[in-house]
Image (cartoon, rainbow, N blue to C red):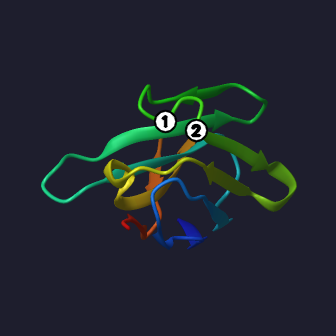
Amino acid sequence: QVQFVESGGGLVQPGGSLRLSCRASGSIFGIAAMGWYRQAPGKQRELVATITGGTTTNYADSVKGRFTISRDNAKNTVYLQMNSLKPEDTAVYYCNVVKVSRSLYWGQGTQVTVSP
């Protein structure tokens, strides 16, 4: 199993910034990619951004140019820098790990609220 420690969520005004972090531990061998997904009330969970062991990244169109995903392989930690936040970014953000075996693991989620 993979355990996660997520942090960095909170309440921020529109136009503000937050930085999420997620440290994975436990059965962390063979990680192919790490990423962030989010789920707003009444909506399905959606991709925000992913990053492979190297530098290949993928972003949802809605966050391109505003969010940046990065990864510290030595610390098994993935970060999400979120700038120019909008009310529609309000959601629970989930850390995600995909292994080479295609096993999928999820963090417990951290709430991000963008409101005046």
Distance Cα–Cα, label 1 vs label 2: 5 Å
The residue at the point 25 percent across, 55 percent down is 40
Res 3 label: none
| Residue occupying the far right of the picture | 74
Look at mark 2 in the image and give the residue it sits on. 66
**Helix, strand or loop at mark 2:** loop
**Helix, strand or loop at mark 1:** loop
Residue type at numbered disc 2: Arg
List x then y, in percent, for residue 84. 55, 47
The residue at the point 57 percent across, 42 percent down is 99
Q: In this view, does 87 lie above or below 52?
A: below
Look at mark 1 in the image and give the residue it sits on. 63
List x then y, in percent, for residue 110. 45, 70
List x then y, in percent, for residue 74. 87, 55
Residue type at numbered disc 1: Val
The residue at the point 32 percent across, 49 percent down is 88
Q: How crowded is mark 1: few (under 14 residues within 10 Å), some or many (20 or more)?
A: some
| Nearer the observer, 36 or 3 | 36
The quadrant of the picture occupied by the C terminus is bottom left
